[in-house]
Structure formats: structure tokens, C-alpha cells
Amino acid sequence: MEQIIDGYCWAADSTEDYRIAPFHILVSEGKVHADQSHIWYMKTLGKLADADPVLQTTGWRRIDLNSAADREAVISWWMKHTDDGGEGLAFKPDAFTLRGDKGLIQPAMKVRGRDYLRIICSPDYDQPKNIERLRQRGLRRKFSLAEQEFKLGFEGLHRFVEALPLSKVRECALALFALESEPVDPRL
């Protein structure tokens, strides 16, 4: 197998070269795992990857946001990673589901690199006038849709694990498709 590039991309010349690099365990026999910590997910996935050559671990590290050294280390890593062509990173709280004053907190925050943002936003997104325009976008609708999709997804998983009729599981999937048809700025 060729050297892994970007932690999750590599050449696949035959089916033996294919790998799956999961970063979350949604369900297992009879259980939805929304109550587990992020560390549990990553350690469990690491054990599974050790036992199955098709699985590839996903890089991760725990940081203390109150530590200046940890913040600097993440920034330095992110800069090198994205300068080398990496897409970015995702910050995740330890708990998979958290509630704040305004309701459910997003389970992850993606921090994209400059090259990725040039593809999504525009080649000149980082010009001052464009940065200001991007800052003015209303994110409330996007966050609302993401929360609804998250809840519907887990409702569908619970229905599946509880062995409800497949039509009841499909109701959640169809509702997700309906939400996806809502117009939202794709650059968000």
C-alpha cells in the first residue's frame, strides 16, 4: 500500500487497498451510541481497526482549550496540514450530545483550510470585501436545518434498533430528504 496522504487518502490499485476510516459509531447490535464520549468512540474504533485490516484509524487528539500551549499546537498542526493540502479539522466536545441555553449544540465544528474555502466560497473569498460579505450571512437557518437533520437521523437509528417496521425508519429518511430540499447557501 502507498503512503497515506492527509490521513485518509491513499492510492487504491486493487480492492485490497481499500480502507474505511470511521470517526464515529452510530449503532451496534441493539444499541444507539449517542451517550458515549468522543474518546470512547475513537478508542473503540482504534481497537476495531487493530482487529480488522479494512479499517483505518482516524487521527485525533484531546486538547485543553484553556491551555495556550495546546491551542498553539493545534494551530501549528492545522496550518501545516492545510498548507499540505489537507481539508481542515473538526473540533468535537467530549460528549456527543450537549444542550446549551438555546438548545442542542452542534456535535462538531469544522475548521476548513484556505484552499478548501477557495473551492467552496470563491477563489478570492479572502479579499476584505468578500470576508465582510461572508460574515453577514445568516447562519440561523443552516443551524436549524442541521439540528433537525441530526434529530431525525437519531430518531431513525432508534427506530431501526428497536426493530420497528422499515416503513417507520424510512419516514425519518424521507423527512431528511425533504429538509435537504430547503434552499440554503451551499457555502455554509
Image: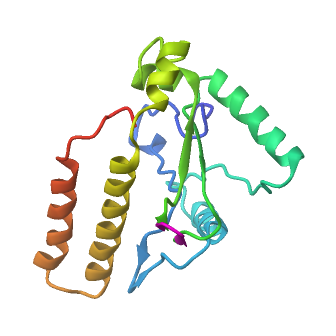
Q: For residue 6, which quarter of the picture?
A: top right
Q: Residue furthest left?
A: 167
Tally the marks: 0
Q: Quadrant of the N terminus?
A: top right
In the depicted structure, whether residue 12 falls above or below residue 27 = above
Q: Is residue 44 above or below residue 10?
A: below
Q: Main secondary structure of the magenta part?
A: strand
Depth check, front residue: 56 or 74: 74
Q: How is the image coloured?
A: rainbow
The residue closer to the viewer here, 45 or 180, is 180
At 67% from the left and 30% from the top, the residue drawn is: 81
Residue 26 picture location, percent across and down: 43, 69
Q: Quadrant of residue 15?
A: top left
Stretch of the chain drawn in magenta: 98-103
Indicate the quadrant where residue 110 lies.
Answer: top right
Q: In the visual, does 31 lie left or right of 152? A: right
- Of residues 163 and 102, the one nearer the viewer is 102
Residue 153: give x, y in percent of width and height: 31, 67
Is 85 left, or right, of 75 in this rendering? left
Residue 75 is situated, as x and y percent measured from the top left of the image, at 75, 36
Tell me the residue at 20%/69% (across/down).
172
Of the 4 image quadrants, the one containing the C terminus is top left
Instruction: Please give left or right for residue 187 compared with residue 75 in the image.
Output: left
Q: Residue at x 31, y 35 (%)?
A: 185
Q: Is residue 99 magenta?
A: yes
Q: Is residue 23 magenta?
A: no
